Amino acid sequence: MMSHFKIRTALFAAALLVVSPLLLAQNASTTIPTDDPVLKAMQMELARSQAKLQLPGQLKPYFIQYRVEDLDSYDARADFGAVSQEHANHQRAVRVEVRVGDYNRDSSTGRGDGTLVLTSPDNNIDALRFSLWNATDMAYKSAVQQYTNKLAKLKGFEVPPSYDDFSHEKPVIHIEPLAHMDYDREAWKKRIEHTSGLFLHDAELGSFADQIQYSISSVSAQVLNRYTINTEGSVVRESRPIYRVTAGVGTQADDGMHLDRSYGASALTASALDSAAVVDKKVGELLIALRDLSNAPVVSEQYYGPVFFTGDAASDIFTELFAPNVEADRPDLGTTARTQGEYTSSYKQRVLPNFLNVVDDPTLKTWQGKQLIGAYEVDDEAVPAQKLDVVAHGLLQNYDICREPVRDFPQSNGHGRAAIAAASRSLVGVLVVRSSAPQSKQAMQQKLISEAKDAGLDSYYVADTLGSQLAPRMLYRVNVADGKRELVRGAVFDELDQRSLRTEITAAGDDAYVDNFLDNEHGDVPVTIIAPSLLFQEIGVKRATEEQQKLPYYPPPSVVAK
Amino acid sequence: MPIRKLCMTAAVFFLAASPALLLAEANAAASQPADTVLLDAMKKELHRAMTTLGKTGSDAANPAMTPYFMSYDVADAWTTSITAQYGAVLNSEQGHSRDVDVQVRIGDPKLDNTHGTHRSSAINSVTLPLADDIPAIEHTLWWATNRGYGNALATYLTVKTETQVRAKEEDTSPDFSITPPVTSIEPAVKPATVDRKLWEEKLSRLSGIFKQYPHVFSSSISMSVQDETDYLVSSEGSVVTTPYPLTRLIIFCSTRADDGMDLYREETFEARTPDGLPDDATITATINRLARELEALRVAPVTQPFNGPAILSGRAAAVFFHEVLGHRLEGQRQRGDEEGQTFTKDLGKQILPLFLSVSDNPTLASFNGIALSGHYSHDDEGQPARDVDLIQNGVLKTFLMSRQPIASFADSNGHGRAQTGYMPTGRQGNLIVSSTNQVPDAKLRQMLIDEAKKQGKPYGLFFEDISSGFAVTTRRSPQAYSVVPLMVYRVYVDGRPDELVRGVSIVGTPLASLNRIVVTGDKQDVFNGDCGAESGSIPVSAIAPAMLVSEMETQKQAQGTAKPPILPPPAADNSTGKESAK
């Protein structure tokens, strides 16, 4: 089997630091600090467990991993111009994974085994060890039980799995400086109050302000410092600060259709988030867009033809339809599939048009000056992050994989990522979609028009932004003849799926939209997806068949008169 | 985090209280003026809703679309919570939250959307702005009222259909009692200034005491302050502000016996402010006592099923009465096709031995210097709290009533209580059991031994501490209860020392067990805690003397199957680990 990935060394990461001054000072070291009480407690208890932990008559563990997550968090939310919720907390949790058996066949169930215990955020070694001791005891007992159950279950299958349960990896020492929360709480509270109250004073909005049903803005800071050590000798300390600001406004059209617009930004530092002026401008635009949407006609019955997706919309498509299927999840025990998901049989097969390439490179920390929150140096199983050629010339070359091998992939490629308090699983880091023949905006435009004409259509559609489940939020019907744009509402796409990804994309732009987000399918792991605008030759656009809800029974308190 | 409806401050003295009780309430919370800006915003928006809903557009022709009652109840709470374990802080948080319960009733007091199983259709809750920002408060109240109205309307239509197609109900009482509006503006609680560093250090230090006990596998000590003020405004014109300061210190420890049985000990201290909590010496003594008790329990013999005489300590009797009797006297349980209605038809009849009386008095702030959890001045429907004589000399007189009428009683007696987010129902406050057949506690013990001899049993049981199990009062399940004994001793008739046993649980049917109480001790003990039921979790207390029961049935408690920890806790492990594991 040919490997297509290259292993990035610490040197390369250092080179990136020199080139990009906007990066955090990530001076990772390979020396284990002696003054870190958390590491000390973990090492002491791990040594004791490794030496002595054994139930009479049962196997000793062959692998133990300790993880301590120190989470300093703050969040606040404002509605209608005033703060309604505010929480601050500093907590630490211990997660222990114990494996019994051997690398080939062990006690892992595939459901993400690990025992979680809350521990002290103080640097008290006794208290930390106490929690580790408790969690290790429970994890070992579960592992012994699970190992017996698994061996019994495997006897029921004709052919055992051809791959190991746990991959062999080299130990890694990687110590990053601890991150601390750096954040002006009072200033941000004022900002979200101001943002959520914008509709009350927006001159351009006029009387539409009385139609706003919700106006929310929230801010959050989650500074995670994560420690991972295991009996193979790995010692990792990584920091992951994420700052996030969001805003959302909503209304209902006269026929009861709910209309929503939202804004969100994530970054590794609070100062890298959009400025107050930028946010105000964006939310102002959202409010006007809501007004325009509520006045817009409902989309016409049905259309099959060219649809242009901006980079913003395209990144959502890759998030929803592509990324989950290139993450190698072990199939059910006893089956012969390679992974789960839509691309389980697509290894080395076409999944995209031949001019599209996809790379997953977690070592990429910025893109044209913008911080990429999906970047990391060592994954959450202590395996160094690798740059992967996921798709080359439209053919699937690699899956993101953690330490749980699947057929044809016996090693981790450094994409084992864990949400807070959760097990590691194969996850995307920084996914970059690029065309080998990028088209300018004008060229895309011309192609759109010619494809519409070829299909005998008098209009085509442009999707600016998408909402949940890829339903369009800002969708325009454009006249072929004169290029006039008309906003429409209430649409959903038909046949926007893996097949159309493979056969319908006829052009990709020379732009690149950077989407930093928290993947909440997997417990809020930071991910970055970068995608160009895309032209699909034939996608269906039709009316959503949502239940039309009742309008409010009485109007909100008027703001316009004030 | 669910907000508990809390007890009241001692600042209210408009109810007659004996001088002894006044002196006893030394720990009172500070107060500040009630938030009238918030009240005004609530009144204004409530009025706007009442005068606009169901009166515009196509609904204008149909008066049935207008709510006949609405209320806003805001719980404005400042909380601090600090927990320590094994010598270090585990968690330390402070916060401020404001939630509003919006209640909407459509129809009329005889039949509205809360009828039958639809009680919760009247209520919905939302978080309110933390500061007095009028436009934000008004918009939030509008949004929640709109949602509540839609739900109430849809449910009312369902209720009307149901009453037409179903069989006639047993209890045809109205759904809402008519009562004059209440105005009571008490000062708000001034949130206690909690020195977090001080308490973190204190609790860390105290929690470290458990390190000396190698078989305590889990332990914690936590302190929580909840300074809440409730603001209630109703369309009837009621305006009620009620302060609820509550501070607690909870000590907990647990272990596991070699046979897998999980055992725990717990103690709660209650006060109105952190200053009212016990001093370090008391806490230290309690920690050591609980740990020693736990160590003794761990190696105590497992009990066998038993049917014979028993003594419940005052504290255990208080829990017992709360579970076995208290829940069955809640008003709404006397009505409804699903309820067992144990005592519904027993008004005026004797249901307890003649020497026992039971009252529920939320107006009592403390008892013998101990702050009472179930103390409040106005319930969650704005009704003044009242001292209610439930059972007088063994005879059932009345039930705990909210504004939901039952066949025998039309009106509330100030016991309509709920956790934020739930509809109020009749609940306990401070349940007080008193007795006219008392003996000194030492005599009680002798009477236990005598009774055991009489019954030919080798011992009687002494239940020193029990915890609430659950009370099953519905028709579909057997009328059983199960309380969890924590510290139980065999008191031998042959003079042997008392023997601690483990694995005991009490079973029985309520009616039978209550009437087997023979005599009581002469000192009442207090049990403070939280009670969970249909209207959520609320703070309560129960007060009772020790009791001798002629016959108590016990069974063996279900065993846990997990083994104790394999290695000793880190601080207790002195071996080097160099020897191989065997």
Image: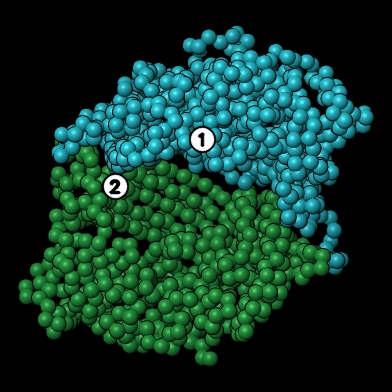
Depth check: give the residue in front, A490 or B492: B492
**Residue at position x 70%, y 66% from top?**
A145
Looking at this view, is A546 or B576 the one in front?
A546
Tell me the amino acid under the disc marked 1: Glu
Residue A219's spot in the image, x, y percent?
39, 51
Specify the subunit that label 2 lies on. Answer: A
Residue carrying label 1? B339
At 46% from the left and 34% from the top, the residue drawn is: B336
**Do callouts 2 and 1 point to residues on the same chain?**
no
> Pointers 2 and 1 in contact (CB under 8 A)?
no
Q: Colour of chain B?
A: cyan
Chain A appears in which tint? Answer: green
Q: Which residue position is annotated with label 2?
A: A215
Q: Position of residue B242 (x, y in %)?
A: 45, 23
Q: Does A39 sit above or below residue A500? A: above
Distance (Cα) linking label 2 and label 1: 44 Å
**Dot 1 crowding, Cα within 10 Å, few <14, some 14–19, many 20+:** some
Question: Which amino acid is tagged 2?
Answer: Ser
Q: How crowded is mark 2: few (under 14 residues within 10 Å), some or many (20 or more)?
A: many
- The secondary element bearing badge 2 is classed as strand
Does B183 sit above or below residue A218?
above
